[in-house]
Image (cartoon, grey):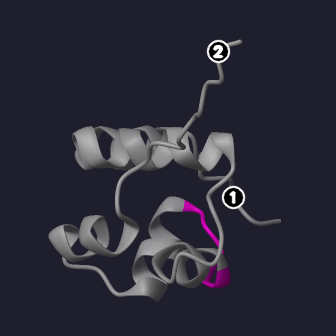
Amino acid sequence: VRVYRYEMIYPDVRELRAQLGLTQQQFAAEFGFSLSAVRHWEQRKRIPEKSARILLMLIAKDAGLVRQALRDSVRRVAAE
């Protein structure tokens, strides 16, 4: 019987945030995470869920592309 062990792979959030020059609050707001989630990930109290891990990996690869995609996903609407 073979036993396999799996590890969750995602960037070090504290290191990623520092590379981008953002505070925890700025990082959370810019990329749509809750501040408490960012704090828990940095303290290794929680592991990001799959969708968050994917987004973190994309941010690590090309933060500018993610920022552009987030800007493109918002449409300005006139207030009535």
Q: Secondary structure at mark 2?
A: loop
Task: Tell me which residue sits at (65%, 70%) in the image.
Answer: 46
Residue in the foreground of this view, choosing between 11 and 22: 11
Which residue range is magenta in the image? 32-36
Q: Main secondary structure of the magenta part?
A: loop
The amino acid marked with disc number 1 is Ala
List the residue tagged with mark 2.
2
Question: What quarter of the picture does the C terminus occupy?
Answer: bottom right
Mark 1 touching mark 2, by CB under 8 A?
A: no
The tag earlier along the polypeptide, 1 or 2, is 2
Say which of marks 1 and 2 sits in front: 2
Residue at 46%, 78% (x, y): give it: 42
Q: Residue at x 39, y 67 (%)?
A: 13
Question: What is the crowding at mark 1: few (fewer than 14 residues within 10 Å), some, or many (at least 20)?
Answer: few
Q: Is residue 28 magenta?
A: no
Q: Quadrant of the N terminus?
A: top right
The x and y percentages for residue 70 are 48, 46
Q: Position of residue 26 (x, y in %)?
A: 41, 81
Quarter holding residue 66: top left
Label 1 sits on a secondary structure element that is loop
Which corner quadrant of the image does residue 37 belong to?
bottom right
Left or right: 11, with 35 as reference point:
left
Give the residue at mark 1: 78
Residue that appears at 30% across and 72% down: 17
